Image (cartoon, rainbow, N blue to C red):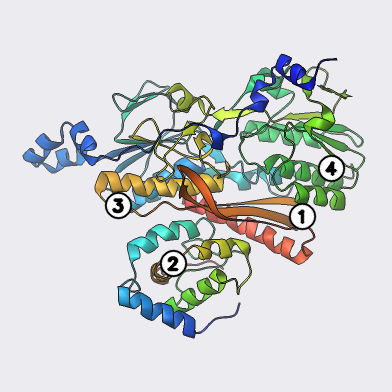
Amino acid sequence: MVLWRLSTMSAGVWLASAATGAVAGDRELGAYLSAECVTCHQITGQETGAVPRITGWPDDQFVAVMNAYKHKRRDNPIMQTIAGRLAADEIAALAAYFGAVSSPSVAK
Amino acid sequence: MMSVGEIRQQEGYTAWSQKPESQSEREGPMDVNRRQLLTGTAALAGTMMLGAPALLAQAKPKVVVIGGGAGGTTAAKYVARDSAGAIAVTLVEPNANYQTCFHSNLYLGGLRDYASITHEYTALARNNGIELVRDRATMIDRDKKEVILAGGQRLPYDRLVVSPGIDLKYDSVPGWSQAAEETMPHAWKPGAQTLLLRRRLDAVPNGGVIVMIAPPNPYRCPPGPYERVSMMAHALKAAGKDRCKIFVIDPKESFSKQALFQEGWERHYPGMVEWLGPKVHDGLKSVDPASGTVVTGFETYKNAALVNVIPAQMAGAIARDSSLANASGYCAIDPASMKSAVDANIYVLGDASIAGEMPKSAFSANSQAKVAAMMIRGELVASRTFPARYTNTCWSMIETDDCVKVGGAYEARDGKIAASSTFVSQTGEAAELRKQQQAENMGWYAGITADMLG
């Protein structure tokens, strides 16, 4: 998988969100939204089949990947559907939530 | 000769023409009133004045969950875990083990073993502090807010989650019955029936005829019957029994992922599968379990090696017996919360609910349970709530490394759960993509079972 660096676009999202105070992580919002993700992506970080780990990523990378799905620059209809309805502050909340989940004992 | 309509009426076909659930009537959302709870918990005020910790603990709000499937386990876990002990959660489930309906077709096809679709409830209970009661809920006393168990025990609740899944309409297929499920299995509830169908499939001789009676809408797992046909054909082909034929007698003019399945059957199992819609079979007239006979308007199938009857369905008995279901046989809910349209203290999840455009799937039930759990915590311990959002994806295996999917995102809109966007696999997709989707399917299974039961 290509790891995206902080793009101009996601930096813009960051700054805009920071202005509304959301990026520091509305952790409660992130926790609620995360429930949608963990039906497939395990909170333990365990990877199975073609479903990758999403815990412990840097916030900027998480935001960049989600935006790539949201704007259909990355393929997969499920992720495009999920990301498609997430607003910038919601993506930031998810990034904050999953970024803070440590997975010390992940079996690969 | 009678018209098709007359035959259907005469043969008890009313169940086959019931309205889709999304058209069923429902009442408006119930008001959430936290004061109702406080006044209902009569002892609370007195307890607080005494201030003894032991008595305070007794005042802890109680959530009872009926049904240990995808909806019930998820609701129990998310209420218990996210309230961190502030809410007492009890899960009522009669079975010691849980066999997933999802991926049971893969067991049928020989692509998963039975142990791999069998799960225990112990980790769920232990990890999240859930009290597990192994019994059957037989009645809900909605006035007293108590669940009555087969063993006589009464479980008081402040909020109740009803997630009983489906019951089968044994009288929806003329000639079939509950007793006949031993000879013409349904395998639409997991467990002994799943094992029976597999044994029967394995015993089909080369050249044998299999007839599947497909269900009318709405039913559990819309692509399920057709994935099952695919997995049966896979098992037959793998055993060298490619002279077998599977006939599907369907009351519906079309079905989920139809173009994808029919393309796959032609590609992988040429000549083995024949799907017949109602205009082509002219209506199912009767089955005879003793002789393995299936009679349609145009054809009689005699001495079938296996007949798989998937009948019409309805919400589980506890939901119907407690008057939570309407005339459709399913339960109307507030699409913004999954709260019952007829009882503000009860939430109904999964297959038993009328969830608008969401299909009856484990994924849907799991998604709905998370919304309900959030709303229940909001009511009982004043935690934050957010607008409901739902998702679903259904993967279906057509052949090894050939998996297709359908899904969508959903929200409360216009008084029902409506799709905000949907997707479905396309015919003619590259083999590599289909293989990737199968890997996704396996990842999802591991994910959702960990989410439900971990």
Q: CA distance from mark 2 to mark 1?
A: 38 Å
Q: Chain of mark 1?
A: B
Query: For the residues tagged 2 and 4, is the chain the same?
Result: no
- Nearer to me, B355 or B348: B355
Residue extending farthest to the left is: B49
Three-letter amino acid code at disc 4? Leu
Relative to B197, B169 lies left or right: left
Q: Chain of mark 2?
A: A
Front tag of 2 and 3: 2
Where disc 1 sits, the SS reads loop
Front tag of 2 and 4: 2
- Nearer to me, B47 or B45: B45
Q: Earlier in the sequence, mark 3 or mark 1?
A: 3
Q: Which mark is residue B84?
A: 3
Three-letter amino acid code at disc 3? Ala
Circle 3 residues within 10 Å: few <14, some 14–19, many ≥20: few
Q: Which residue is mark 1?
A: B400
Point 42% across, 45% down: residue? B75
- Confirm whether residue B121 shows in the render: no
Q: Chain of mark 4?
A: B
Q: Which residue is mark 2?
A: A87
